[in-house]
Image (cartoon, helix red, strand yellow):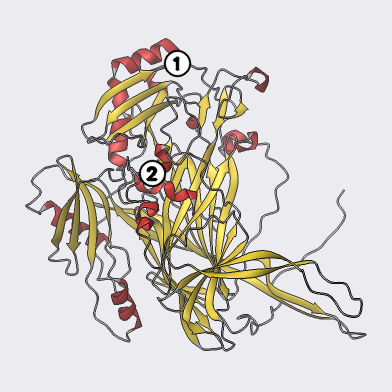
Amino acid sequence: MYPPLVLVLAIFFAVATAIAALSSPLPHPLDPLSPTELTEVRSAVLAFSLVASRPISFHYVGLDEPEKPDVLSHTNAAAAAILPRRAFVIARAGGLSHEFYVDVTNTSAPRVVSHGIHDGPGFPMFTTEEQVAAGQLSREYPPFRESLQRRGLALTNVGCGVFSMGWFGKNEARRLAKVQCFIVAGGTANYYARPLEGVTLLVDVEKLVIVAYRDRAAYSVPKAEGTDYRAGKAGPPFNGAVPAPGVVVQPEGKGFHIDDHIVRWANWEFHVGFDMRAGTVISMASVHDADADLWRRVLYRGFASEIFVPYMDPEEEWYFHTFMDAGEYGLGVSAVPLQPEADYPANAAYMDGYYVDADGKPVKSENIICVFERYAGDIAWRHTGVAGPIAPITEVRPDVTLVVRMVVTVGNYDYTLDWEFKTVGSIKTVVSLSGILEMKATNYTHVDQIRDDIHGTLIAENTVGVYHDHFITYHLDLDIDGTKNSFIKNTIIPKRNTGIRATGGAPTPRSYWTVLYEVAETEADGQVNINGAPADLLFVNPSKKTKVGNEVGYRLIPAGATATSLLANNDYPQRRASYTKKQVSGLYAEQSTGDDNLAAWSKRNRRIKDEDIVLWYTVGLHHVPCQEDFPVMPMISGAFELRPFNFFERNPLIRTRPPGNSPNCSCSFGRSG
């Protein structure tokens, strides 16, 4: 992950226009804060007399969600008063991290109801404004100018960006960050492919001063030719091996309905929220049981908690590349406007999001969440039955999926984060990676020249794609038909058939497998490396059973990308992200020490049997770059699925109508040439 680049002579990323549109009170207790509420939060914090230091820099403002029992009582009631609306704020003033809780139930009289100081390690995420300012510091720094002069580079051809510096055993009182630079000349948009290797600045991002400078070594600057990914530069001529364009036809209109933040589709209903750190938040997901004619809750709250990206190069300019994208840069802040009929099909609807800038003013991000139905030709269920001389009987039902999508661009990497809802009752979560590799400059132009470990792949002349990992951790507050759930490991156990003799001379099977049913009693029991013994991982409601007596549940199904961290347990980056050894990060990820992550919390080893439990699941990928990843990387994906397991009495799609004929659709086939 590279941070957003800041050009030396101009701000590369402009701060979005502040939005303060008036809106009425929001009815749902989990709705994100409105622009009006955000404006009132800012007013209350700035007016708070116990914080005399100025300026106050806002790093996070989000909904302080009401207690879960209150939310459930509120949403289950036919008519209920609006629950209190509160905001949680992290702001910096006087060199301290301040935490505020602000009541905005009455937006005409907002008030701070709680204030505290964070006195532990770590800092809040960077603001866009301080990244821009810190990236420009090199501009007037004489040693940096001298480094460029020695390399024959002009100041106007170089841009710099801010990198989080990780944590390596020393707890800093200052908010420090690294600054590294790139060549922006040469007519290519892909400046990440042309790093100014060997030069690193250490910057105090609050005082905006350079506190250390290092020019270790000079390397050949990779050439610009062949690095641009824009259509106008990459072609024409374009590759002819591209499928013909297609369209989605829905003659009766969209099959889903969005009411503010509530989405209703087929047999699903759920709430879509937005958070400047987590991005998309899915809440109150319930599936309709047609046989019982009941809405049954599956997921109370789910979101991407953290994305940990450590790089595997121990050199001075690289060892600290151990990014935590959510806690250091913010997934919601980094969400980008989606491109019609490219990021999503023509049948999509979209939502906007609001966050705050460093001054606390609301910023509108347009079209950052889209919702659409996917018709991919998949099959929900089918069977062809053949019985004697009669004609075969075939029944097939198509699989249609509702997708909620956000794309997050954190510097060089693009993450497409999908929540997929299926009529069979499944929720599938998919993360797809594309964008630009982190590349380092080298003097090598051919692999035959390499004698040592270069910690990556030579993907072009003078260009190494560095080895790295991606660990995307999800927070999943599951409510399987209620809040009292248990975690079950159904481990597959091979057995030998001994001591049993067949009668009548029939052969005897010598081996088979069976299932060992284990209920996790404590948090330690619930930690699982899914790459171990094969097992079904289940979340069940022991108080709810099917007619034949099975506990209703959902099964966790990994879908590839199950890598776990290979870093040493006592290595500092691994201590920060120790949860990646099993399968969340604390509030202050920037320069955090790992004292407040999931691994630390779970040491309490609390009881989890028949309790309101939360699952954290990590999608893990080891990335060995290849030449096909250059100059821009094709999409790779990892996923997991929450699938009904004895939740319904039978296949919930058994009464699904057969498909009709598609309107206005004709096909013809012929021989080419």
Quickly name the residue at label 2. Answer: 576
Residue 424 figure quarter: bottom right
Going by the image, does 624 lie left or right of 666? left
Q: Is residue 576 visible?
A: yes
Image point 53% across, 79% down: which residue?
552
Residue 325 bears which disc, if any? none
Residue 254 x %, y %: 53, 72
Residue 409 figure quarter: top left
Between tags 2 and 1, which lies in front? 2
Going by the image, does 508 lie left or right of 184? right
Residue 642 figure quarter: bottom right
Going by the image, does 568 lie left or right of 387? left
Q: Amino acid at mark 1?
A: Ala
How many marks overall?
2
Q: Mark 2 or mark 1, which has the lower sequence index? A: 1
Residue 217 bears which disc, if any? 1
Q: Residues within 10 Å of mark 2 (few under 14, many from 20)?
A: many
**Relative to 504, residue 455 above or below:** above
Residue 176 x %, y %: 28, 33
Residue 590 x %, y %: 33, 42
Q: Residues within 10 Å of mark 1 (few under 14, many from 20)?
A: few
As helix, strand or loop, the secondary structure at mark 2 comes to helix
- Residues under numbered marks 2 and 1 in contact, where contact means CB atoms less than 8 Å apart: no
Which residue in the rendered view is the most extreme toward the top?
A: 150
Considering depth in this image, is 321 or 460 the residue closer to the camera? 321
Image point 51% across, 34% down: which residue?
312
**Relative to 469, residue 155 above or below:** above
- Label 2 to label 1, Cα distance in Å? 30 Å
Q: Amino acid at mark 2?
A: Arg
Considering depth in this image, is 13 or 113 the residue closer to the camera? 113
Q: Is residue 254 visible?
A: no
